[in-house]
Image (cartoon, coloured by chain):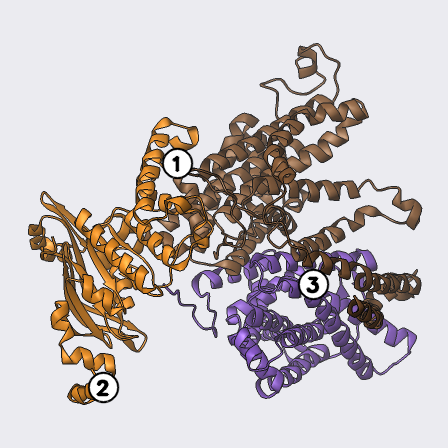
Chain colours: A purple, B orange, C brown
Amino acid sequence: MEVFLQQLINGITLGSIYGLIAIGYTMVFGIIGMVNFAHGDVFMVSAFVAMIAFLFVTTWLGIASITVALLIVLIVAMLFTSGVNWVIERLAYRPLRGSFRLAPLISAIGMSIFLSNFVQVTQGPRNKAIPPMVRGEFILLDSNNYAVALSYKQLIIWGITAVLLAAFWYLVAKTRLGRAQRACEQDQKMAALVGVNVDRTISMTFVIAAALAAVAGTMYLMYYGVVSFSDGFVPGVKAFTAAVLGGIGSLPGAVVGGLLIGLIETFWSAYFTIDYKDVAAFSVLAITLIFLPQGLFGRPDVEKV
Amino acid sequence: MAGRGDILLNVEHLTMRFGGLVAVDNLSWHARQGDITALIGPNGAGKTTVFNCITGFYKPTEGRISLRHGDATVWDELDSLTERGKRHITTANGSLFQLERMPDFLVTQKARVARTFQNIRLFAGMTLLENLLVAQHNSLMVQSGYTLLGVLGFPSYRRAESAAVDRAREWLNRVGLIDRADDPAGDLPYGAQRRLEIARAMCTDPVLLCLDEPAAGLNARESAELNELLLSIRDQYGLSILLIEHDMSVVMEISDHVIVLDYGVKISDGTPEEIRNDPKVIAAYLGVDDEDVEKVEAEVGL
Amino acid sequence: MEKSAQSTGVDFVHAVKEACLAAAITFGVLLPLIGFETVSNIDNKLVLHTRWGLLFTIVAIVGVGRLLMALVIAPRLAQRRIRPVAATAPSWLLLIGRWFAPFAIGFAIVYPVLAMGLTGFSGALKWVDNFGIQILIYVMLGWGLNIVVGLAGLLDLGYVAFYAVGAYSYALLAKNFGFSFWILLPLAGILSSFWGILLGFPVLRLRGDYLAIVTLAFGEIIRMVLINYVDLTNGYAGIGGIPRPSFFGLPFTADDDGFAAVFGLPFTPVYRTLFLYYLILALAFLTAFVTVRLRRLPVGRAWEALREDEIACRSLGINTTNTKLTAFAIGAMFGGFAGSFFAARQGFISPESFTFLESATVLSIVVLGGMGSQVGVAIAAILFIGGTEIMRDLDFLKQIFGPSFDPTQYRMLLFGFGMVIIMVFRPRGLISTREPSIFLKERKAISSDLVKEGHG
């Protein structure tokens, strides 16, 4: 019971991170029908930006308050990562819009290779570890010599995820931009005809996707305290799995899928074997796509004859 | 030759539901050998759904669709075929197929029902000749020793291929596209694409040819040419044709038998002459109740 | 004339604005990752160093580049666009097209001799091994995957799985049972195609990107099993001491019964390298030959028809399930051949050689070459693999950028960048026209605008 509760807490934390990345996959897929292969690496870049911002804020500016530092780091990471993704969309994907269907996918794979190697070249190939940002925990339950702990950083991750999801939901459901996005999802030509700036809407989609990935990257850094240039691929695939599981194109689906993948992964590691934990995620991906390609919340794809 | 032969295709109690929507409701009709049977009706009447059920692209919710090869006496075996749960049965006199039990490709391969599509589906990046060779896939596959002998370069495949090319050439001649044999199909004008699709379907050597709106998008001259082509195919090969059509000039001119659908239900069934004068049909097309037909006709000057 | 002069004046201001904007964006985007460097100090704590010089150099290059682009290059391009484009390719290009394949085959056959003539007997080792053999492995993998992706239009991101199956089949069977290379080569191919069918079955219904992602997942699952099933595969440590292929029973060793001794030649490792080179060349030719034959067989035409329109295929009585599975199986078989060759050549394999990056590399070779075009795939393999191999040797760059500069680090960086660039400028690949498999009167190439890329 105690182990279960602890794994539940850990799983939700991990799941929040995956969910935030998954939204990026699902939004981009929804609007331009492309699997943005480089999104995992954008997440990795954001973790590096967050790390540099953290070092800058704490060692150069000497800000001691962890709340202020964390807030600055979060905002800086979101800003810069959004900029990076905006440029990526402009250079690598926009020229390919409406062309051969495989071209954007190959371009995205190339971008993914480029980003991870760019970080390797500019920041070095080693793991980068920073001192813990947040210490301390609540002990929820203590029996049989097993304490169930909810650490402050887990609480922060839950809190920030909840706040950002609310803000994001407002953005998509209630604003002009959100309406434009939904219009472009349905029919880009028609949306353009009724006065939606399609290019700008797609750009904004990439910006929002990157901002959410940056939140995930910052929290990943805070949670594990270590990041390396190769950390984009596996979380990227897991988040994509989450998006598929939830039903690609569905935003609530991405969040639910993220939580499920986080839980599956932690419980698998806790109760079975940690060796095959990535196999679990990949198997879930394959099984979902084969047996439930529309996911939990997606619309089924009907074959037209 | 236009005389009505024995029943070739028998559709009984066909029902197709998509979720809550009933696209085809308890529909029964048959098509006779050597006939051109037309399936008409307003948009959304369920005509293409019926086609997709016959050709195996949809599995009907209920109903039986059966087709005969050979002598008409094989129809006696129908109930025993259904009972036994098999896809087809072969006797000394012929074979009987229960189409709704067969996957789409077997409907063409074994039951020899070929079809075209409402929105033309050619292999746009392949040449006309290649399109017609792909249609002869199954016989060529056997001749190539299921690829094995072909890879090793056995001469039997080369002979079979040149026979297939001759057949393709004959059909290209028939539809007047022989000069464009080496051009990609996607380069053809619309009317020519329609003709090529029919030629391609004919290369599968069918007993029943199903055409989904073959005259759609054709001008009057092309439409007349199409009529001629269909009649000549029918007369020369004793082929039966089933067609969905909106163009009444095509339907009335060439069909022997017309079935009218509205909202998934059969509302009329008979010769073109009978259909033309059926108030129910006119009502369905004009979108008014039966009683108001005369009034509306007077208004629009019919 | 006057008008154009006027517009140039306006253009200049505009161009400067554009250049400043580009420079500003570059600065903003690169500030964190290039402006700052994280370095571990003596206490093993991370500290920040700045690299303002590098950052501003790059910003300046981008700014000036954008300015030149707007002022010099763009007007020229615009002018060229105004001029009517020749409807048909120039005759010299057609001539090259006709003679390229025979020339390339001849060159591939005499290549080791040329290399030896130019660089000496032992100097040629590097050129034959690192370039010749390495490139040919990828040419073969590219041609194998071309069957699945280029002809059948099935997007496969896990092709490396079959390469791995071939390599591990050879390594394990040769080490544990002592079978010879010539028995295991076909066996590895059969095992790989068996896996191709096994993995192909569940994904038959999927289309496009979904298919790509599931095949990626399968590729990764196989790699993780190779890592974790230590009893069989020795995990990360890999398998060493894999028996080398022999020349019809004569091993390439310095022993008395070795190849060199039997033929009365002085022993050198070059013989083995040459043998391996001609072996992979023969395997690659086999792949090409079989593919050319298959395209003219009903199964090959059915693959291409499947890529064009699956529903139409089914309406013509083609069993699309079998057709897809044959594509997977035959593509996987060639991957398996290449894999067992790889194991035999290296003598050592580990899961590190079978990462997703390999699948991505092979797929990009196929797409960049021009899907379905064998010549294009070969050119792309030479460009990519040869190009990244050459990057290992650019020692002179150290004199420009200082001794700490390591060109090998930039290999993959440029590789990824190259993928993006080629996609942006040639999305249909280098050779984008399709050759018909048969013709009545005249063989005409088909423009890529008409050829579909498949949806599954």
| Crowd band around label 3 with a 10 angstrom C-alpha radius: few (<14), some (14–19), many (20+) | many
Please say whether residue C434 is visible from this viewpoint.
Answer: yes
Same chain for labels 1 and 3? Say yes or no: no
Amino acid residing under circle 3: Asp
Residue denoted by label 2 = B288
Mark 1 falls on what kind of element?
Answer: loop
Residue denoted by label 3 = A41
Instruction: Report the Cα–Cα distance between label 1 and label 3.
Output: 44 Å
Mark 3 falls on what kind of element?
Answer: helix
Residue denoted by label 1 = B147
Which is more foreground, mark 2 or mark 3?
2
Q: Mark 1 lies on which chain?
A: B
Q: Which chain carries label 3?
A: A
Instruction: Report the Cα–Cα distance between label 2 and label 1.
Output: 59 Å
Amino acid residing under circle 2: Val
The reply to whether dot 2 and dot 1 touch (C-beta < 8 Å) is no
Give the x, y percent position of residue C43.
91, 62
Point 24% across, 60% down: residue: B54
Judge left or right: residue B217 versus residue B236: right
Q: Which chain carries label 2?
A: B
Identify whether A15 is placed above or below C314: below
Instruction: Report the Cα–Cα distance between label 2 and label 3.
Output: 62 Å
First in sequence: mark 2 vs mark 1: 1
